[in-house]
Image (spheres, rainbow, N blue to C red):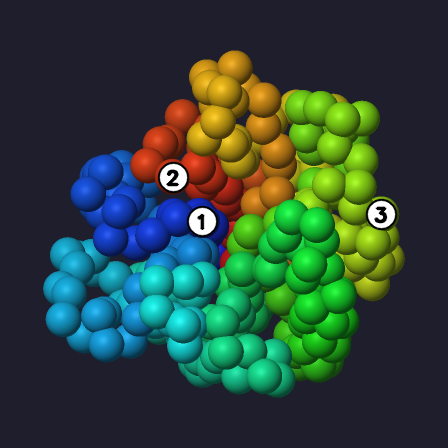
Amino acid sequence: MARKLTLISWNVNGIRAVVKKGFTDFLQEYKPDVLGLQEIKISHATREKVEFDFAHYDECWNPAERPGYSGTATLTTLEPIFTTTKGITGDVEGRVQTLEFDKFYFLNCYFPNANHELSRLRFKEDFNKKFLAHVTRLEKKKPVVVCGDFNVAHQEIDLARPKENVGEPGFTKEERAWADQFVAHGLVDTFRHLHPTKVQYSWWSYRALARERNVGWRIDYFFVSKSFMKHVERAFILDEVTGSDHCPVGITISV
């Protein structure tokens, strides 16, 4: 008998900060079976000193080497067969976690920001290339579910002001071309597949009351292998949830 699961992704912009803003209430209300977190901003040393109350969840942490920067974590009620943070060679920024479950791999990813003046665009392009190679290796065994902050708005519908942002970080032709390549590889943007014309965002600047005015970007995604799309029943954006400059996004699957 198939089991229905809720998978959620959220760039929390600091795990300690979001805990102070009702994170445990979020867990209790939405009850994700697997939750991928990005930009946790906590070091291994600090993590060992802080006790979080994430009842009923196993915790997998992948902080960056640089304290207070980047990093990912996954909370899960499902017992993984295998977990690794070694999918991307040379990743010292804690950007990728891979968890193997019975029917799929779960990849929690925090993609690099191209930065102002595009100072990290080449770094990001190299990361993207390595990441797609990692996905390709995994798919030889079973389908993948990829979630996280991709730091790119793929299409014009994915940001409120596309014309004003052409060439800006997150909306360069290089980053969008890579998103095209990701889709061409056979990975499906679950939200856009199920909601072809829906305008909804997952990130807003803290400036100029952007969230209140809904001047946002959709840069947080769930992609799945094409063969796995038949298991996806729902894709959603929880833009009513606050606590970060991003909101959670998710899918419901039946496996």
What residue is drawn where x is 13% and y is 64%? 51
What residue is drawn where x is 52% and y is 15%? 213
Q: Residues within 10 Å of mark 2 (few under 14, many from 20)?
A: some
| Residue closer to the observer: 237 or 158 | 158
- Hey, which quadrant is residue 34 in on the image? bottom left
Marks 3/2: CA–CA distance: 27 Å
In the rendered structure, find residue 244 and report the number of the disc placed on it.
Answer: 2
| Residue closer to the observer: 162 or 61 | 162
Q: Residues within 10 Å of mark 1 (few under 14, many from 20)?
A: many
Give the mark toward the camera: 1 or 3.
3
Residue 11 is situated, as x and y percent measured from the top left of the image, at 45, 49
Given the image, on which type of amino acid does mark 2 rest? Ser
Please say whether residue 147 is visible from this viewpoint: no
- Residue lying furthest front: 117
Asked whether the residues under the numbered discs 1 and 2 touch, taking CB atoms below 8 Å apart as contact, a structural biologist would say yes
Asked whether the residues under the numbered discs 1 and 3 touch, taking CB atoms below 8 Å apart as contact, a structural biologist would say no
Identify the secondary structure beneath mark 3. helix
